[in-house]
Amino acid sequence: MASPNSGEVGAAGDLLETGLLLAASKQEEAAPPAAVETTTTTTSSGRRLAEHEMTATRSRVRQVVRRAAAQLQEVFLGTKLFPLFSAVPLAVAAEHFSFGRAWVFVFSFIGLAPLAERVSFLSEHVADTAGPTAGGLLNATCGNVPELVIALFALHKEKMEILKWSLLGSILSNLLLVLGSSLLCGGLANTGKERPLDRRQADVSIGLLMLGVLCHILPLLSKYTTSTGDSTGSVLVLSRLCAIVMLIAYFGGLVFQLKTHRQFFVQEESSQSSSSSNSDDEGTNNSVIGSASTVIWLIGMTVVIAVLSNYVITTIEEASDALGIPVRFISIILLPVVGNAAEHAGAIIFAFKNKIDITLGIALGSATQILLLVVPVILIVSWVNGIPMDLDLNLVETGSLVMTVFTTAFTLQDGKWHYLKGFNLTLCYIVIAVCFFTIKAIPTPKKHMPEMLGLESN
């Protein structure tokens, strides 16, 4: 028989088990809200992270937009020629909507001026990291981009006369107009003083220019001294051989200045760098254009220059007839003035600051590069493409080149400069410009030059 205490113990055990079950169930019921709270916390953290990323992305986009706007302002509005940029879209519109060939030429011609100036400006940023001599060479190379592009398009369209005239005009413009006006303005700013100049760079450039002149004289003379009836073949062969010699001479000059005899130019470079370090460093630090952006801008500017140069070469004859200006005058005088606008302005500014050695480097370096590098490269390209091109510039053009180089050489021979020397060089350029303007209706004779000179053949 069971005792009463055993029943009470069994009931107590049942109650205890029931209590434990209830407690467990309550714990189970309390667990889901904690999990929901953890999930909610994770979701809010993810939202905050996404918002932070969106904010950072927007900040980066704003920085990129601001930097692009600053670059656009510096590139396009950083020059006094920025109103002329409007001629670029006008040239494209005139070509697309057929406004007239003369309008296409005029707008393209005007649009090349600010583009050439901006190419020179951008090349200075790249040249700052290359040192004074190499940087000056790079600056001169980029400054000759318009002339090179125009020459290539003229070669592509086989307009050989325009090709030769434009290259000749670039040489004449650098040696007479750019150098002459720089010496004139710099001399007037230092009236009553005779300033010295470093002849080392001038002697190297003049020597190379003399060689280039010789390579242009010989094809002209050989045309009238050959014993055969057709002298075209011999002139062409001689011109190609001279082009190879000119290239060798140019690169030999580079090795001389940059490698073997660099010490001759170290003192000159250091003085120029110290005299202009404050202004140059200030301008470099304030610039918002980096190296990569500079290269991109240079490529873009070159593409636009190529488009406008194509328009110029295509419409130059029609524009000449419509405007009443000889094609020879446009090619030799007007086109190089636009292409050398940046070099012209820079050379005058340095002359005003009495930094004449930099002015000589700009004018002589650019002329030497065109005569001994651009001209033979164009000739070799035409040789490869089967286009007959020689170094015969005809009598008046060759004579102008010879007298220009000799006049420049005699001007710089004493190692001093003043405004009268610049005045003489500028007047020489004006005389040559008038000459090419007045002979518009006189074709250059080629087959009867001995009779023209009074030398009748037997």
Image (spheres, grey):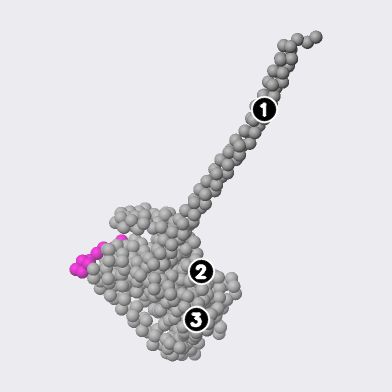
Name the residue rendered at 33%, 67% in the picture.
347
Type of the residue with mark 2: Val
The dot on residue 149 is none
Alpha carbon separation for disc pair 2 and 3 = 18 Å
For the residue marked with disc 1, what is the amino acid?
Leu
User: Which residue is the site of mark 1?
Assistant: 22
Question: Mark 3 sits on what residue?
Answer: 94
For the magenta stretch, what is the residue range? Answer: 190-198
Please identify, in this view, whether the residue under mark 1 or under mark 2 is nearer the observer: 1
Farthest residue in the right direction? 1
Q: CA distance from mark 3 to mark 1?
A: 92 Å
- Residue nearest the viewer, comparing 322 with 2: 2
Any magenta on residue 195?
Answer: yes
Above-or-below relation of 198 to 454: above
Question: Earlier along the polypeptide chain: callout 2 or callout 3?
Answer: 3
Residue 298: percent from left, percent from top: 47, 64
Taking the spot 53% from the left edge, 82% from the top edge, the residue there is: 97
